[in-house]
């Protein structure tokens, strides 16, 4: 077990007494406090990747900085289903879930890396982003252009199977772009097809990361909203049955139900604070 892994048991909730950063408060909750600290973590991770020194422990340790950064900005993080990650026991799987903001990729290494080696399916354009490209190359991420669906499917099936055969799990966000709203019609079946083709299980996850908004002009630097709590939940891994349609239905229902529940909690809390 990594000495840097933060989470015991099946769940985690930010402690009620977690302290908000004094500097963040003095800056009146300015988003740049978050982005400057986040960039420093991002830079250090990219440099280690460029030098070939981004070990599992370093990935966890640095990503923990993003967990603490969210909490320093007044955010609350809730994790559920961590035992479902442990139950995989290092087996390569395809992790499939919704994509809401850049925050999930910043936190995933702190949550997942202890339990499985993994990489991402990403937009090819991201390989041009300084530092980020070093991280993705180091992780052997699978780039897709999103201009030709057939080429993208071929790349994911071929390269994804190679990663899975080598024991590396693959994280796929089947939505075409990040969105705070979950639209099942835009949630494609590429992850289920990969799992079926490679003969591995799928592990569904649902997340709510609108703590970090998508910006109107700078999409990756949107508003920071501490009142919107961060949620991750991982369902049990399961084999893809038949043509995969039933598995897709289960994944979509899981994500939709969790988002509805989390937003109802948030709405109830907000109404309570207004009374």
Image (spheres, grey):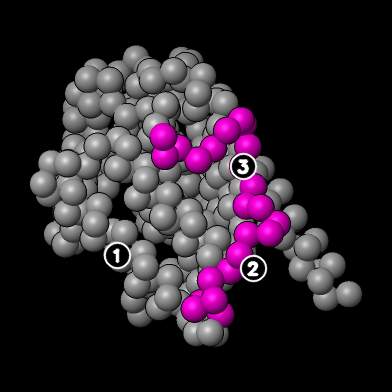
Q: Is residue 15 magenta?
A: yes
Task: Work out which quarter of the rendered image holds the C terminus and state it.
Answer: bottom right
User: Quarter of the image holding residue 54?
Assistant: top left
| First to last magenta residue range | 3-25
N-terminal of the two: label 2 or label 3? 3
Q: Which residue is mark 2?
A: 227
The answer to whether residue 172 shows anywhere in this view is no
Nearest to viewer (mark 2 / mark 1)? 1
Q: CA distance from mark 3 to mark 1?
A: 25 Å
| Label number found at residue 265 | none
Residue drawn at (42%, 39%), measured in percent from left and top?
4
Q: Which residue is mark 3?
A: 12
Q: CA distance from mark 2 to mark 3?
A: 18 Å
User: Quarter of the image holding residue 160?
Assistant: top left
| Label number found at residue 40 | 1
Residue farthest right in this picture: 275
Nearest to viewer (mark 2 / mark 3)? 3
């Amino acid at each position: 077990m990594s000495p840097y892994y933060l989470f015991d048991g099946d769940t985690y909730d930010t402690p009620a007494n977690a302290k908000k950063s004094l500097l963040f408060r003095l800056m009146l909750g300015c988003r740049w406090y978050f982005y400057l600290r986040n960039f420093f973590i991002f830079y250090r991770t990219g440099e280690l990747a460029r030098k070939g020194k981004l070990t599992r422990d370093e990935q966890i340790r640095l990503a923990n900085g993003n967990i603490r950064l969210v909490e320093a900005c007044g955010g609350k993080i809730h994790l559920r289903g961590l035992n479902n990650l442990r139950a995989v026991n290092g087996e390569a799987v395809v992790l499939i879930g919704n994509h809401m903001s850049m925050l999930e990729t910043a936190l995933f290494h702190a949550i997942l890396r202890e339990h499985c080696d993994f990489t991402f399916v990403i937009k090819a354009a991201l390989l041009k982003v300084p530092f980020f490209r070093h991280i993705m190359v180091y992780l052997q991420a699978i780039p897709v252009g999103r201009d030709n669906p057939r080429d993208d499917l071929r790349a994911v099936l071929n390269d994804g199977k190679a990663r899975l055969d080598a024991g590396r799990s693959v994280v796929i966000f089947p939505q075409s772009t990040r969105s705070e709203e979950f639209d099942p019609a835009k949630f494609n079946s590429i992850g289920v097809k990969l799992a079926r083709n490679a003969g591995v299980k799928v592990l569904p996850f649902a997340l709510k990361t609108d703590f970090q908004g998508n910006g109107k002009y700078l999409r990756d630097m949107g508003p920071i909203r501490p009142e919107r709590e961060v949620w991750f939940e991982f369902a049990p891994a399961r084999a893809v049955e038949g043509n995969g349609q039933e598995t897709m239905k289960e994944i979509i229902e899981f994500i939709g139900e969790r988002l509805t529940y989390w937003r109802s909690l948030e709405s109830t809390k907000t109404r309570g604070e207004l009374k």
